[in-house]
Image (spheres, grey):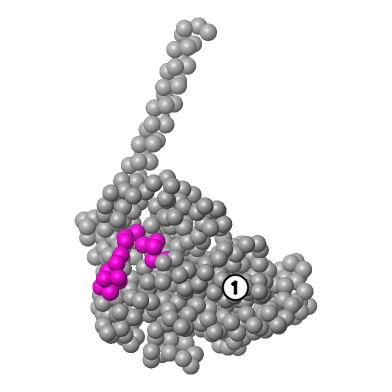
């Protein structure tokens, strides 16, 4: 080769290398510099990550989603396409009288799909209500499950599918440790079709009555094969139910976006089957969580205030799906971990808009009541993400210092909750400072989610967060 040609190749190679170096430097400048999302510091101390301790990979899993006005009418054809011989349809007593369930049953009848209805799902299910549904499923030869309703219905149907497919299993075999044995679910379950935003997750949550605290079952095997997201169903949702459902979406998005990064989560699984469904924040989940937060900020107030606003309610339904994909892979952290004893230890509070005969702090409400305190606490580990969330919710952050990120996000959340007439803290739903030790004890077993907090915490920290949440305004 002639010297001139060699020189041209060298120059071209150097130019390409310079471009690569330039791109890498741009990425470094764009990367989040906060302690929980950089390799330098974590938890306010020296880096403790090591190749042998922390995970190095994350997985992205989601149900198939079908969205559109009236898609519920297609479910009978879907079941035919699956070759279903006998279908278990699950819902709750309230929903069983409403158009969504009628639409499903009409579609099954039209397509000659043999089925049986279980309408005794408990709003905020318990281990006892799970076991009743499991018994119903075991006593027949169902080969497909259909859940019509919100998270309580879908979670109950997931459990019924699991234990009817594993009839010899003890109930605690698959329940998350330390309450249960946390055994991995090996192999596929029967097909499950679901119909609200929760269909994208592999988690089933219930109130474990002996401890008066919520726990759950977590496995990708629980994920439904198809989620039918029909915005027409949202028009039948009472205002307070719409509000509390929206608060759950809000916290799903905020917690998954600020969760401990996947490559700082421990322990690294010895086998991929042991990698948890909730893996920590990651680049793919971030996209879904951030987008869900933007939709919530734009449409939630409209959706709550005007039940006939189809655009707003449809958008919130989609936001639930977006957030479900995000948190279904990244996970949630302290708001959800602390919510379980709040909901599980309810004494007398009767939630507005819910036709139930038992005291109830709805899930979304129990989650959001601690959010100002929680994000004030976690902000030092990832101020940029907390500030971005505050800006999405309407805060002006142009002159805000990084160290004030938590206070700014907390104020934005308080304003959001006040505008939507949320109860004034834990005191307003029946708790006092005397209940804090019990609330802390109920949070401790929730390691599946609390360990994803970007900031480590002690029992004293939890007590302070509950105390700070007694009053919001």
Please say if 391 is above or below 12: below
Where does the image place residue 315, in percent across and percent down from the top left? 49, 68
Q: Quadrant of the C terminus?
A: bottom left
Q: Is residue 452 magenta?
A: yes
Q: Residue at x 70, y 72 (%)?
A: 144
Could you say which quadrant of the image residue 417 lies in? bottom left
Could you say which quadrant of the image residue 368 lies in? bottom left
Q: Residue at x 54, y 84 (%)?
A: 128
Where does the image place residue 191, in percent across and percent down from the top left? 67, 68
Q: What span is colored magenta in the figure?
A: 449-464
Say what secondary structure mark 1 lies in: helix
Residue nearest the observer in this picture, 254 or 360? 360
Residue nearest the observer in this picture, 259 or 246? 259
Relative horizontal placement of residue 205, taking residue 389 as reference (left or right): right
Residue 388 visible here: no
Where does the image place residue 293, in percent across and percent down from the top left? 41, 63
Q: Residue furthest bottom?
A: 357
Residue 134 visible here: yes
Residue nearest the observer in this picture, 388 or 131? 131
Residue nearest the observer in this picture, 63 or 185? 185
Where does the image place residue 456, in percent across and percent down from the top left? 32, 61
Q: Residue at x 45, y 62 (%)?
A: 331
Please say if 91 is above or below 183: below
Q: How many marks?
A: 1
Please say if 201 is above or below 369: above
Q: Circle 1 is placed at which residue position?
A: 158
Could you say which quadrant of the image residue 425 lies in? bottom left
Q: Is residue 86 magenta?
A: no
């Amino acid at each position: 080769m002639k010297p001139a040609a060699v020189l041209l190749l060298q120059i071209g190679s150097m130019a390409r290398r310079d471009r690569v170096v330039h791109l890498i430097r741009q990425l470094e400048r764009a990367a989040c510099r906060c302690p929980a999302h950089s390799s330098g510091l974590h938890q306010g101390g020296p880096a403790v990550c090591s190749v042998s301790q922390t995970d190095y990979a994350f997985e992205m899993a989601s149900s198939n989603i079908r969205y559109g006005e009236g898609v519920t009418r297609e479910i009978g054809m879907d079941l035919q396409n699956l070759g279903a011989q006998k279908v278990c349809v699950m819902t709750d007593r309230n929903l069983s009288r409403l158009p969504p369930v009628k639409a499903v049953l009409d579609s099954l009848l039209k397509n000659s799909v043999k089925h049986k209805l279980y309408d005794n799902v408990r709003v905020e299910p318990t281990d006892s209500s799970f076991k009743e549904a499991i018994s119903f499923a075991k006593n027949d030869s169902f080969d497909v499950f259909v859940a019509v309703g919100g998270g309580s219905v879908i979670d109950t149907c997931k459990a019924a599918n699991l234990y009817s497919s594993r009839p010899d299993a003890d109930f605690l075999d698959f329940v998350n440790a330390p309450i249960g044995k946390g055994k991995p679910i090996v192999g596929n379950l029967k097909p499950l079709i679901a119909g609200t935003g929760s269909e994208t997750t592999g988690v089933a949550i219930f109130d474990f009555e002996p401890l008066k605290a919520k726990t759950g079952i977590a496995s990708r095997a629980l994920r439904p094969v198809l989620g039918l997201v029909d915005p027409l169903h949202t028009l039948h949702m009472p205002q307070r139910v719409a509000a509390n459902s929206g608060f759950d979406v809000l916290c799903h998005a905020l917690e998954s976006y600020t969760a401990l990064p996947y490559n700082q989560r421990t322990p690294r699984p010895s086998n991929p089957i042991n990698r948890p469904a909730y893996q920590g924040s990651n680049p793919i989940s971030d996209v879904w969580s951030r987008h869900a937060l933007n939709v919530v900020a734009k449409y939630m107030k409209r959706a709550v205030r005007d039940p006939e606003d189809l655009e707003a309610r449809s958008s919130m339904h989609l936001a639930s799906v977006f957030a479900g994909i995000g948190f279904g892979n990244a996970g949630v952290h302290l708001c959800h971990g602390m919510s379980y004893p709040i909901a599980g230890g309810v004494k007398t509070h009767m939630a507005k808009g819910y036709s139930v005969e038992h005291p109830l702090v709805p899930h979304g409400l129990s989650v959001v009541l601690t959010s100002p305190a929680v994000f004030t606490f976690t902000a030092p580990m990832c101020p940029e993400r907390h500030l971005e969330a505050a800006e999405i919710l309407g805060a002006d952050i142009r002159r805000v210092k990084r160290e004030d990120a938590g206070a700014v996000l907390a104020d934005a959340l308080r304003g959001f909750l006040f505008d939507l007439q949320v109860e004034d803290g834990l005191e307003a739903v029946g708790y006092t400072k005397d209940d804090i030790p019990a609330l802390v004890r109920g949070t401790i077993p929730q390691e599946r989610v609390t360990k994803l907090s970007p900031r480590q915490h002690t029992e004293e920290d939890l007590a302070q967060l509950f105390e700070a949440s007694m009053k919001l305004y």
